Image (cartoon, rainbow, N blue to C red):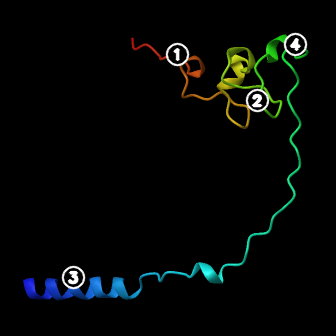
Amino acid sequence: MKKIFTLLTAFSCMAILTFAQEKKDNKTKAPAKKESVKPVEKAKPAATAKPEEKHLKKDGTPDKRFKENKGKEEEKHLKKDGTPDKRFKENKEPAKKKG
């Protein structure tokens, strides 16, 4: 039994090695096309921004890492279809008492 197992293992290893990927030459690769890059609009200065949007990213969108830019608490715990997400404590129904 050991001899059969050894032969099967050796055959499997040889089969795997024969199907290994070959290295591709970098010379055959086509040169990358250079595309023109459009400049990104700069963010508004903090003085002209709304008070709740003090912290902006470079592209002008509000930075969600800050408390004042995050959505309402109710919006956080909803599924995509708008139903409450039962993984959170405030959305779970109270447990029924026995008795």
Sequence order check, earlier mark of 3 and 2: 3
For the point 71% across and 78% down, which residue is it? Answer: 30
Residue 72: image x %, image y %? 73, 18
Where is 32 relative to 79, above or below?
A: below
The CA distance from mark 4 to mark 3 is: 71 Å
Query: Which numbered marker is on residue 9?
Result: 3
Judging from the image, what secondary structure is the residue with disc 4 in?
Answer: loop
Give the residue pinned by disc 4.
47
Give the residue pinned by disc 2.
57
Query: Which numbered marker is on residue 36?
Result: none
For badge 3, the amino acid type reads Thr
The CA distance from mark 3 to mark 1 is: 58 Å
For badge 1, the amino acid type reads Pro
Q: Nearer the viewer, mark 4 or mark 1?
A: 4
Residue 43: image x %, image y %? 85, 28
Give the residue pinned by disc 1.
94
On the rendered structure, is 67 left or right of 89? right
